[in-house]
Image: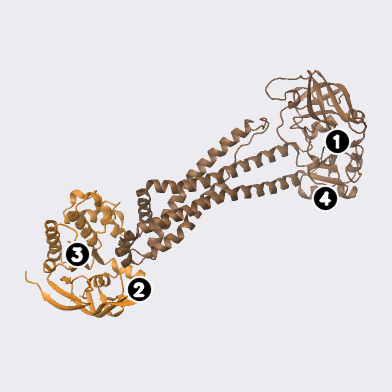
Chain colours: A brown, B orange
Amino acid sequence: MKTIDIFGYAFSAIKLRKLRAALTILGVVIGIAAIVALLSITQGLQASITNQLQQGLSTNTLIVTPGVSALGQATSGSGGGAGGRGINLGGSSTSNSGFNLYVNYTDQINALSPDIEGSFAVIQRSGYVEAGGVNRSVTIYGVDFNQYAKQYSKTFVAASGTIPLNPADSETVVGTRVNNPGQNGTLLFSAGDNIGIVWSNATTLPVVNETYTAQVSAVLQKIGGFGIGGPSDTGVYIPLSKAESFFGTDQCDMIIVQLKSSDNATITNVSKAITDYFGGQVSVISSTAVLSLLSTVFSTVQLFLGGIAAISLLVAGIGIMNIMIVSLIERTREIGILKALGMKSRTVLTIFLGESVIIGLIGAVIGIVLGWILANVTARVLGSGVFGGGGGFTITPLLTPEVLLGALAFGVGVSVIFALYPAWRASKLKPVEALRYE
Amino acid sequence: MVPIVEAVNVKKTYMLGKVPVEALRGVDLKVETGDFVSILGPSGSGKSTMLNLIGALDKPTAGTLLIDGVDISKLNDNQLADLRRRIGFVFQFFNLIPRLTARDNVELSMSISDTGRAQRRKRAEELLETVGLKDRINHKPAELSGGQQQRVAIARALANNPRFLLLDEPTGNIDSKTASEVIRLIKKLNVENNVSIIMVTHDQHLAREAKRTAQMFDGQIISEVVNQE
């Protein structure tokens, strides 16, 4: 029997029991839709985070922090509240081992390798700003504006005002969510205004709130969610020299090292040189390392979520098997007739498998479309800040060809696998007995 | 020409639970091309078993059974299926596929034997015209009377140009008036189109419509008579 005739016959059998077929297909649809929705959202999330990280952390950059724990210390710690230093996970300038990084270590680091373009220190504290009678939690960064602007040329960019490259001590630059917390146009202050910058000095007892008045030279463009070491929407930037005097320290929280090249060998060599130089007392984070860690994390998450969705597809598969067995029993006589007319066993097998292919294919296609719609709706809901996201972060679901073809193959594959047994049983029916079946 | 059926001392034993049942106890039968033979017998005489064997649906336990010159005990399942394409089966209960139209039912047996779409469509229409159902080709079995369904079944059986038609109580489920029409059709096919026919029945009147009648009893053919026109 020709393939097209086999599929035609299989399709006529499916058409006969429309509701039953629809419910069977629905099982596949739900499984595939769940897989596609979950995977395209996580992939979109990964792409979005990776993209933002790459902006905040250019690939030719290393971040040196004191202490040996890997990644947690390098995050900006925004919203850490007053009293800051102790709260950042090992990220304060006094690490457990007692090792400290100092602002003037940049010269020593620069001398370590010819691959180093330059380096600069960042002092970082949690604090808040006072403006218009409102206190707003922020992270205060002491940086060299000139080097910082050069390093983060895409994100350390003024939306209003001008970033001073040789700032006076009283000048400051703030992230967009500092003067516009709700991102709704209600400005607490604007470029040119004076604000109070407050830091709770917990190195003395009782804790003293230290304050000075600074003039806002510039408000940054919106950056988005993340930035390891890089500019942040809730950051307040003050000149490094002012930070040293204001915080009363010349210890820094990180030193950002610019490399001449972003190839892996350079990153590895320089990272090792710096770690060795400080006797293993520092962590060196590269964008490559962060991104590869991130990719590992997301692979695990995807595997987990995909696995959960796959279980629902297995349930659908069992449904298919169940229906096929019922169908096989109902059609025993029909199979007898087909065999009496000269149909071979393997053709009977192919007809039953053909039915499962049709069910799997229809289910997978509808499931992919539905999953994609679901992913977009979810992304929009998440992006709109309904769940407290604050609208600072957008996810664009990503449907890669791998996910698309994988979902299609998985849907059809599960259908066929669960149809194997019923189809095999149908093909093994003896014509004499099948014809006698009432 | 090779005889269409040649049975020599054919035996068939079933296991009914743990009890062996001898359904056929040495049957000899020879049917030549162009013949019209009826196998007559009461229920339990072994005629259904004989039908299954001649239809290549089952194999004998002992003896030799040649269908169209082929010893069926030597065939595997695939080869038996191939052989069945050369036999035109007509069942007591019509056994049409309910969801297919008359034409699709006739086409089905041709699509099983790989006939092209255009060709089988044309032939299905011709055959339905031959059996007098030209105006019913797009009707499904449920929309046809018993006699009409049986005529569709005959058209289906003829579709692959079989070596012979094998009829199982062809009028068993239709009223007597329609039955005589079906009989007339069968005789016409035999006389005018030279189609060889083997008919299994328990009905003496029907059996006499054939050229020859083989009387079965208790798993054996006890007599063979030539019927008068």
- Are both tags, 1 and 3, on one chain? no
Q: Is residue A11 above or below residue A335?
A: above
Q: Position of residue B145 (x, y in %)?
A: 19, 52
Residue at mark 1: chain: A
- Are both tags, 2 and 1, on one chain? no
Q: Is residue A295 above or below residue B2?
A: above
Q: Badge 2: how crowded within 10 Å, few (<14), some, or many (20+)?
A: few
Check residue A85 in the rendering and tell me which mark sits there, or answer none.
1
Task: Find disc 2 in the rendering and name its residue.
Answer: B17
Q: Secondary structure at mark 4?
A: helix
Q: Secondary structure at mark 3?
A: loop
- Residue lying at 40% horizontally and 61% vertically, measured from the top left: A349
Circle 2: residue type: Gly
Q: Is residue A200 left or right of residue B84?
A: right
Q: Is residue B65 left or right of residue A154?
A: left
Seen from the viewer's position, the closer of residues B2 and B97 is B97
- Are both tags, 3 and 2, on one chain? yes
Q: Is residue B211 above or below residue A102?
A: below
Circle 4: residue type: Asn
Q: Is residue B170 visible?
A: yes
N-terminal of the pair, mark 1 or mark 4, is: 1
> Which numbered mark, 2 or 4, is in the foreground of this view?
2
Residue at mark 4: chain: A
Task: Find disc 3 in the rendering and name its residue.
Answer: B169
Task: Find disc 4 in the rendering and name its residue.
Answer: A269
Residue at mark 3: chain: B
